[in-house]
Image (tube, grey):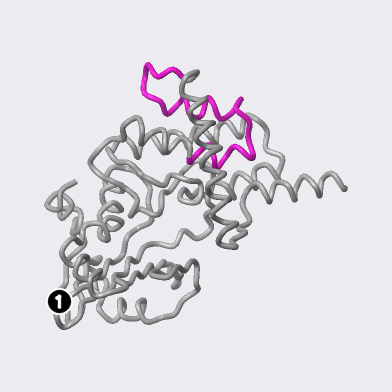
């Protein structure tokens, strides 16, 4: 999507753009400057951190801050701001088309005296009481959900992913950690800076998404459930017998690369596979 097309989603109804000293802000019109200042100043509860970004919870809101990191990066950000504005614009775009995403509250670009962007902040709704789909699936299994319940869960998830695709849009990181639900029927998408709006995915993009979803779910479910799930999201005429071997091969490659990187970086996250292993050990011992 072009910068001009993207701009229309920066200030939809009930939102406005504000020019203030040291920052440019797109914000819900009923939010006062002092309320925004409080959200930006309050340390909040840390959720995620990387060398150039922090994600915190402040009450009912999530505040994601990013820093440019260098003068050159700041100049580049000021000249080509579209990527950092993507999550804000995508939130409005998807919600306007009936796809669930956290409510956006404000997007801020911080600027120095030279007009160079030094950082950004994206503030959106905290999905209180929600689980990402891997954790939700674990709870279903822990509570003894049957095959019919699991099939309904997968059908709802597939329909939500199709709804996103048909807006049209493509989420380049459609892994389980970026899809949330509270009831297994309604699904919300996060990490929206990874969303390309205004263009349907092609075969390669669709394959990438199916590999991500398969990798997120295959430790808990077999192909008897996952093949119909992926087939539900395929365009008419696509042969699932040809599609699935490619998915399995690429998923194995993805898993090996991720685990190799974790080992190299000394990272040992606890994912669905590990929780299921613990659950089955406990049940085996009881």
What residue is disc 1 on? 115
Q: Of all residues shown, which one is farthest toward the front?
A: 264
x and y percentages locating residue 123 in the rendered image: 34, 66
Q: Is residue 114 left or right of residue 44?
A: left
Vertical position of residue 225 compared to residue 83: above or below: above
Q: Is residue 57 left or right of residue 134?
A: left
Corner quadrant of residue 187: top left
- Name the residue: 38% across, 34% down: 206
- Name the residue: 50% across, 60% down: 128
Give 78 or 260, whichever is nearer the viewer: 260
Give 16 or 1, whichever is nearer the viewer: 1
Q: Is residue 218 left or right of residue 234?
A: right
Residue 237 falls within the magenta-colored stretch: yes
Q: Which residues are magenta?
A: 212-239
Q: Is residue 150 left or right of residue 160?
A: right
x and y percentages locating residue 139 in the rendered image: 65, 47
- Name the residue: 48% across, 35% down: 156
x and y percentages locating residue 12 in the rendered image: 19, 56
x and y percentages locating residue 35 in the rendered image: 31, 78
């Amino acid at each position: 999507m072009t910068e001009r097309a993207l701009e229309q989603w920066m200030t939809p109804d009930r939102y406005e753009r504000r020019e203030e000293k040291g920052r440019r802000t797109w914000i819900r019109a009923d939010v006062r400057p002092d309320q925004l200042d409080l959200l930006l100043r309050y340390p909040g509860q840390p959720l995620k951190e990387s060398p150039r970004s922090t994600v915190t919870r402040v009450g009912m809101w999530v505040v994601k801050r990013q820093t440019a990191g260098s003068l050159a990066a700041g100049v580049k950000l000021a000249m080509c701001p579209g990527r950092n504005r993507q999550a804000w614009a995508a939130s409005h775009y998807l919600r306007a088309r009936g796809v669930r995403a956290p409510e956006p509250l404000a997007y801020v670009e911080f600027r120095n005296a030279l007009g160079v962007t030094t950082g950004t902040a994206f503030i959106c709704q905290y999905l209180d009481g929600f689980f990402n789909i891997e954790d939700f699936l674990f709870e279903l299994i822990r509570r003894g959900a049957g095959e019919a319940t699991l099939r309904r869960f997968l059908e709802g998830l597939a329909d939500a992913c199709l709804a996103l695709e048909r807006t049209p849009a493509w989420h380049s990181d459609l892994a389980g950690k970026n899809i949330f639900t509270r009831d297994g029927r309604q699904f919300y998408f996060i990490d929206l800076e990874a969303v390309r709006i205004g263009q349907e995915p092609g075969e390669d993009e669709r394959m990438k998404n199916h590999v991500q979803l398969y990798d997120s779910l295959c430790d808990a479910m077999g192909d008897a459930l996952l093949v119909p799930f992926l087939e539900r999201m395929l365009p008419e005429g696509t042969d699932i017998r040809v599609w699935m071997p490619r998915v399995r091969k690429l998923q194995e490659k993805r898993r090996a690369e991720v685990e190799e990187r974790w080992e190299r970086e000394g990272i040992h996250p606890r994912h669905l596979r590990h929780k299921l292993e613990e659950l089955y050990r406990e049940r085996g011992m009881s």
